[in-house]
Image: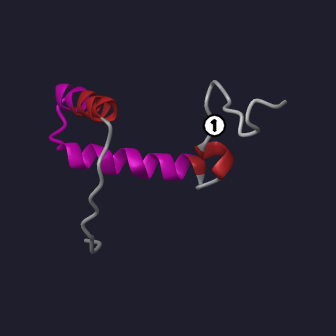
Amino acid sequence: MEASKQFSFRLPEALVERVEYCTQEMRQIGLDVTRTDVVRLLLNHALDATNCQVGRLLKSPARRSTSGGRT
């Protein structure tokens, strides 16, 4: 088993609710998971899917302008 380190952070309530929803969905199909397990799975998936490429990490349906309103 790989060694692990504790990592603590705060999340907005809406994000916690989404994690809780995923946890319940996984439990409903018979998986015995904790919220920590789900966060770990989601984090691994995000890192694998984006390969930590900034453009892929920050991609969203509505692009935010960093030009202060200028186009």
Spot occupied by residue 17 in the image (x, y as percentages of width and height): 27, 29
Give the magenta part as a residue range: 24-49
Characterize the local packing of mark 1: few (<14), some (14-19) or many (20 or more) Cα atoms within 10 angstroms. Answer: few
Q: How is the image coloured?
A: secondary structure
Tell me the residue at 84%/30% (across/down). 71
Tell me the residue at 25%/71% (across/down). 1
Q: Is residue 58 magenta?
A: no
Which residue type carries mark 1?
A: Lys
Q: Quadrant of residue 33?
A: top left
Q: Residue furthest bottom?
A: 3
Q: Is residue 62 left or right of residue 43?
A: right
Would you say the magenta stretch is mainly helix, strand or loop?
Answer: helix
Between residues 10 and 42, which one lies in front from this camera angle? Answer: 10
Spot occupied by residue 31 in the image (x, y as percentages of width and height): 19, 37
In this picture, is 29 found above or below 40? Answer: above
Q: Is residue 64 left or right of residue 17?
A: right
Q: Is residue 41 magenta?
A: yes
Q: Residue furthest right?
A: 71
Q: Quadrant of residue 63?
A: top right
Q: Is residue 7 left or right of residue 50?
A: left
In this picture, is 22 found above or below 54? Answer: above
Q: Secondary structure at mark 1?
A: loop
Total numbered circles:
1
Spot occupied by residue 27 in the image (x, y as percentages of width and height): 18, 31
Between residues 30 and 51, which one lies in front from this camera angle? Answer: 51
Q: Is residue 62 left or right of residue 32?
A: right
Between residues 20 and 12, which one lies in front from this camera angle? Answer: 12
Tell me the residue at 35%/47% (across/down). 41
Tell me the residue that label 1 is attached to: 59
Spot occupied by residue 35 in the image (x, y as percentages of width and height): 21, 43
